[in-house]
Amino acid sequence: MRFQDYDCETFYDEWMAAPGKPRPEASLLVRMLESLPAGELQRRQLAAERAFLVMGITFAVYGHRDGAEKVWPFDLLPRLVIMDEWERIDRGLRQRIQTLNLFLNDIYHTQRIVRDGIIPEEVIRTAKSFRPECIGLRPPAGIWAHITGTDLVRDRDGKMYVLEDNLRCPSGVSYVLENRQVMKRTFPQVFQASRVLPVDDYPSRLLDTLQFVAPMSARNPRVAVLTPGVFNSAYFEHSFLARQMGVELVEGRDLHVDGGRVFMRTTRGLERVDVIYRRIDDDFLDPRVFRPDSMLGVPGLMKAYMEGKVTLVNAPGTGVADDKVVYAYVPKMIKYYLGEEPILPNVPTYLCWEKKDLDYVLEHLDQLVVKSANESGGYGMLIGPHSTKEQQGEFADKIKAAPRNYIAQPTLGLSRVPTLVDGKLEGRHVDLRPYILYGREIYVQPGGLTRVALKKGSLVVNSSQGGGSKDTWVLPAPPPQAVDGLDVRTPITMGAQ
Amino acid sequence: MLSRSADAIYWIGRYMERAESIARFIDVNLNLALDLPPGTQEQWKPLVGTTGDLYRFLERFDTTTRETVIEFLAFDVDNANSIYSCLRGARENARAVRDVISSDMWEHLNATYLQVSDEGARGRARHSSYQFFSEVKLAGRTFEGLTDDTMSHGESWNFCRLGRMLERSDKIARILDLKHFLSNGKTSSGALDDIEWSAVLQSASALELYRKRHGRLIKERIVEFLLLDREFPRSVHFCLVGAEEALHEITGTAIGTFRIPAEQRLGQLRSELAFARAEEILEQGLHETIDAIQLKLNLAGDAITNAFFIAAPLYSA
């Protein structure tokens, strides 16, 4: 495997400073790859894919009835992040999640930030995911968004930006943990020598977080993960997390509200539940409060929650901060609530509901990325430079019809990581989603999920749109030189006959 | 545990055992085919007869040949009791209780499913039938080993064992009944009779143990061995003792007593067999006795469903 012909083009490459010149943190991996016999990397790649298939680490693709499950493509070459940079990301994410929680608490109570003129009232009121039902709600410890996965991207200039906050039910953390397992088995020596920061304690920290926010009345808080069921695309993750935490995985039909409390139906009758890590959207949580046609939810759940008899994680209503217009105000929020400068900048964002921005966006549709304010998963999006005149026309009409629902951003030249494609190494664009837990303290999992757009030139990394994943290695500085010494205690031999 | 999870794991136990048992049925004929005197026709219809699915088979196929029967019993997507369907059912249930079963169990189950649903599986079942169905049998037993070895022996394990043992009781009875279908109600001639009995015993993994105990192939002793034996781990009686143990571990009721209909029905059937004699069974008719056992097993299964799995559990401790 040679890096001589590897072409960085005009993008920032996470491994290579220049053609043939690896960055210091990548030199160990580059040497290792160059020393592999021909075909060996492909062989290991196949073995890894086979491992995922046998482990059943799959996701459901909506709209496909045949088999309905796919293995999420995984690429063996990890993304590397050095400690200096990681520390800055870590601080930036803490700052951001703290701010967003203060914001959520504020807008569902006194709306100080609106009265002080930082965010127009209209933005909040018109956000589709604002939940009037949550006004006045006081979640335990004042935390609304306990579990988040923030999307970061690096532009051509090497600078990191926050692309999205994902405060509802971000998925993917199970892939971080499983990818890491596979990587350890695939490159044991390099992995050990690199002293990669561990990610494996996520499930126990998640359980701590969930138990911390249990209702005061619960002495031994009983936690459950609420899933829409086996047909949900993230079902694997739901069951994985429940298993790793050793808690019950429940569906709506397993739960029952009685006397204001929430119970599970078990073989021994009803058993109480105190904390629900729900992987169901607000809309489907409780047919009495939200969508009446929901078959996934639990009638009476919201009432029990509002009365403090059970804790929902994340709190309903957090989606308002995922609205892409609200997102544009986060840097101002940071200054407003914390009196600090944002550590991680936003991607510059044009708000189509402001006349000046709208005019600019309509004139530059061929250069900008236009996004619907309320969609996620790479849907409802126009990537200007990759679009036809016809598509741009369609979007112009949509934007003019509902300017509040659209924002636009410059098309970033996302950074790239070498990726194995047809037996060769080629650069592919990536983003990064670190996972953050907010309970007794804030925990940022070192690394996170690197999503990679596997199609040549593509900038869309979503699993539903041809994206794959990579392991993310946070490496302590300075770059390691040798494998650590082995344990030297006197071995105890086995007994013999 | 959750009623839904208990239901799923009980059916994982049943489906895995059923898949293995269907492979054992087919095995009877593969064994027979090797030993039949030259010129004797292979009989595949009895195999479908013993599963109780003959009508469903005849709706789909005109002839009972090796090809059609293996297709129906092993691969048919529309036959709910084909090996493929059982593995798919077990896997769907396992997906729903990934948090209850171990990763080892899941991975093994998933790999077995992938093997049987693989494009090449039909070809392998045709060209190396013996090998293919041996692998299915082995996969079932490996799953049992993994279940016993990697799950905590608590409530969920007992539900799995309960499902497995009830299913095994039923299937051993059906393997024994296969002899009835093979000889078509008549008594076969001496040599053929021996060949058929030893194929039946072999498929129940009973031939060696039977020979050690009784030596010669005698109808009364074979019936006794497969239905009533206290030590042979696949006899119907032995399996029912296991099922009863599992059920009483779950409920906490002392064995020999009952509080719920499931305990009563299972206990009655188990004690019937505990005090039965092979000679009396043969007097009353083997096929009829086996039918009665199967019916009672189904009733016990219904009672278990009612007690533990339906939305609002009737049973509460």
Image (cartoon, coloured by chain):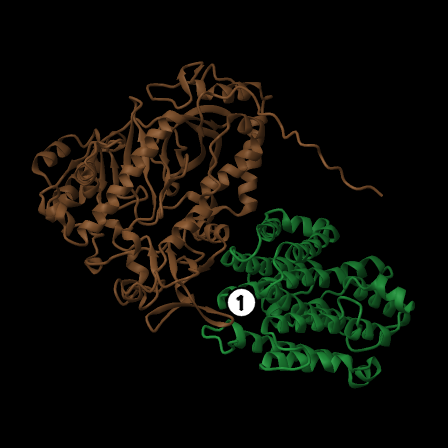
Chain at numbered mark 1: B
Taking B11 as reference, is B91 above or below it? above
Q: Is residue B96 left or right of residue B227?
A: left
The residue lying toward the viewer, choosing from A120 and A71, is A120
The residue lying toward the viewer, choosing from A408 and A29, is A29
In the image, what residue type sits under mark 1?
Asp
The residue lying toward the viewer, choosing from A381 and A299, is A299
Residue placed at 50% from the left, 46% from the top? A57
The colour assigned to chain A within the rendered structure? brown
Residue that label 1 marks: B7
The colour assigned to chain B within the rendered structure? green
* Location of residue A109 in the rendering, given as x and y in whole percent from the top left corner: 17, 54
* Location of residue A331 in the rendering, given as x and y in whole percent from the top left corner: 20, 36
Residue placed at 72% from the left, 61% from the top? B24
Residue placed at 33% from the left, 48% from the top? A146
Q: Is residue B65 left or right of residue A277?
A: right
**Quadrant of residue A411 within the rendered picture:** top left
Q: Is residue A165 left or right of residue A33?
A: left
* Location of residue B316 in the rendering, given as x and y in whole percent from the top left corner: 51, 76
Does residue A374 show up?
Answer: no
Query: Which quarter of the image is occupied by the C terminus of chain A?
Result: top right
**Quadrant of residue B21 within the rendered picture:** bottom right
The residue lying toward the viewer, choosing from B109 and A306, is A306
Residue placed at 29% from the left, 42% from the top? A97
